[in-house]
Amino acid sequence: MKHHYPNMRLEIIDQIPYIVGGYNQEELSYMTHYLMSFGKHVKIEYPDDELKESYLNQLREVIDQY
């Protein structure tokens, strides 16, 4: 990870990198923006439906620009 976030870490499992950790609710917008920076190379796997929905909404906003 480019910056150090005390509640997040990078783990390599079976040669696949995972960002593991949590975020504060007031950081939802920032976390969504951060994940968007990975483009197609990110998948939200567990368990945060709110983060997934925020991510999908941001993707829709990008698509709607075209």
Image (spheres, rainbow, N blue to C red):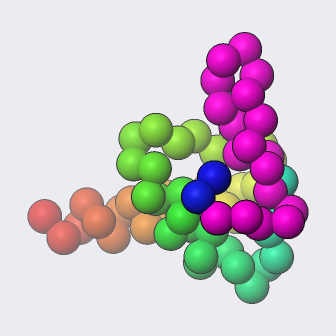
Q: Residue at x 64, y 64 (%)?
A: 3
Q: Residue at x 85, y 66 (%)?
A: 6
Extreme-left residue of the structure: 66
Left or right: 12, with 64 as reference point: right
Q: Residue at x 44, y 58 (%)?
A: 37
Left or right: 12, with 39 as reference point: right
Q: Position of residue 50 (x, y in %)?
A: 70, 64
Left or right: 58, with 35 as reference point: left
> Vertically, is 35 above or below 58?
above
Splitting the image into 4 quarters, where does residue 25 fall? bottom right
**26 inside magenta stretch:** no
Name the magenta segment's main secondary structure.
Answer: strand
- Asked if residue 53 shows in the view, the reply is no
> Vertically, is 33 above or below 55?
below
- Asked if residue 20 shows in the view, the reply is yes
Q: Residue at x 25, y 60 (%)?
A: 63
Nearest the eye: 39 or 2: 2
Q: Position of residue 53 (x, y in %)?
A: 59, 61
Residues in magenta, as a range: 3-20
Q: Position of residue 8 (x, y in %)?
A: 80, 57
Q: How many marks?
A: 0
Splitting the image into 4 quarters, where does residue 62 fall? bottom left
Extreme-top residue of the structure: 14
Q: Position of residue 31 (x, y in %)?
A: 63, 68
